[in-house]
Image: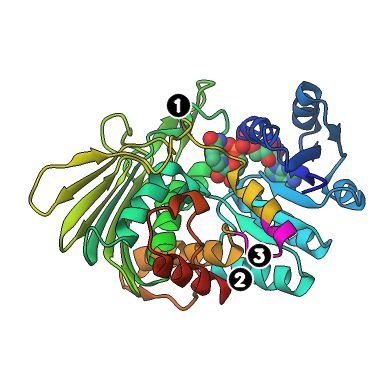
Amino acid sequence: MSEPLRIGVVGCGNIADAYVRHIGKAPELLVHGVTDLKPERADELAGKYGFQTYAGLEEMLEDDRVQLIVNLTIHHAHYEVTRRCLEAGRHVYSEKPLAMSHKQAQELVDLARVQSVRLACAPITFMGEAQQTAWKIIREGRLGAVRVAYAEVNWGRIETWHPAPEPFYDVGPLFDVGVYPLTLLTTIFGPARLVTAYGKLLYPQRVRTDGIPYQVSTPDFQMLMVEFDDGPLVRLTSNFYVSQRTQEAGIAFHGDQGSLRLGHWFMYDAPVAFAPYGEPFEEVPLVRPASPGVEWQRGLVDMAHAICEGRPHRVTGEQAAHVVEIMCAATEGMASQRAVRLSSTFTPPAPMEWALDGMSDEGISKIVKEVGNE
Ligand SMILES: NC(=O)c1ccc[n+]([C@@H]2O[C@H](COP(=O)([O-])OP(=O)(O)OC[C@H]3O[C@@H](n4cnc5c(N)ncnc54)[C@H](O)[C@@H]3O)[C@@H](O)[C@H]2O)c1
């Protein structure tokens, strides 16, 4: 790449610092400027890193040097901000979820296609070393057919660390964090077909970090059964009550020949362990050493290369829209107490190049062919 991809960041809240710091490590990317509804937040971030600030999104979009917008606004604002950026002919990378309804998510996917720009949406944690290792072991058939997976999202009490927890409770644990294992599971197994769900409010009286009490009115505990077209039956538990220190936040995959335990769906350096059927787990080495936690820039780096090379990027709006459909079906199912059938589809991303080692040429060419058909 001769020139870095020039990025505008919209939303300078809690997660923005980690994003811009990680983006700063990638020579393919350059943060050009930032903006926020609260100008003091944009000023603070810009002052720390020497970025330009814009008075608002429209001013940012008037600057032709900004090629891609990173949307780090809060959940309910994602759709409007992303739509406006796509209309203005910019590539967009949004934080999750892509939108709060499947109709809106699909509208964004269609708009990006019409505008011939790229649309991507977090989470990108399927790109991590631990997650790619787990996927490789499943792809290589060491578990045989995988028929059951248990995914745990015990995300604790947001109000004990986030200064503005209300939007997180407004959308609930599934839309905020259940989206992580759902994105990883759809990466590995492709589109899902049927969702059955249950939700309950366990702990309504909360207290913010500033000591102000407030009342949660949406379910803080959600449980889903998800059936995949071509994969396992998944039981996913998401809640804002149980701490991951006292209950795991990982995924267990169970197949005819064995089981695989991915210690975390978020951390790139999570432990991965394999057990032949009925035997104890033994940890397996990751496909390559992992940096701790998450590299927030990884999806953007892939996008920059994909744009340059004219190939599909891995973190797609299509997949994110399908995940939104799963979550909306769950919300509908919780209200109606009925299973909800899904209709959307997408092409799963290619594994990372560094996770293909050890696969047969035939296996690699099959993956490349499938992704090329997108
Ligand atoms: N905080 C985390 O640890 C974390 C981790 C992963 C992902 N995320 C995701 O990142 C997003 C942001 O989370 P956060 O914790 O930074 O939230 P936050 O509330 O701390 O920050 C959001 C910022 O967006 C601004 N904003 C809202 N609407 C806007 C608009 N229309 N135009 C411009 N600015 C607008 C707000 O003023 C605020 O400063 C969420 O979607 C969340 O799911 C957060």
Q: Is residue 40 above or below residue 234?
A: above
Mark 1: is the Cβ under 8 angstroms from ligand 1?
no
In magenta segment, residue 266: no
Residue at horizontal 66 percent and vertical 43 percent from the top:
72
**CA gap, disc 1 and disc 3:** 42 Å
Residue 132 is at least partly visible in this image: yes
According to the image, label 3 marks what residue?
A: 311
**Residue type pointed to by label 2:** Gln
**Residue type pointed to by label 3:** Arg
According to the image, label 2 marks what residue?
A: 106
Q: Is residue 22 above or below residue 198?
A: above
| Crowd class of label 2 (few under 14; some 14 to 19; many from 20; radius 10 Å) | many
Name the one closer to the observer, 187 or 337: 187
**CA gap, disc 1 and disc 2:** 34 Å
Residue at horizontal 37 percent and vertical 65 percent from the top:
189
Name the one closer to the observer, 63 or 73: 63
**Residue type pointed to by label 1:** Thr
Please state the extent of the stretch shown in magenta in the rendering.
306-313
Name the spot of residue 374 as percent of width and height, x first: 58, 74
According to the image, label 1 marks what residue?
A: 160
Secondary element type, mark 1? helix
Quarter holding residue 245: top left
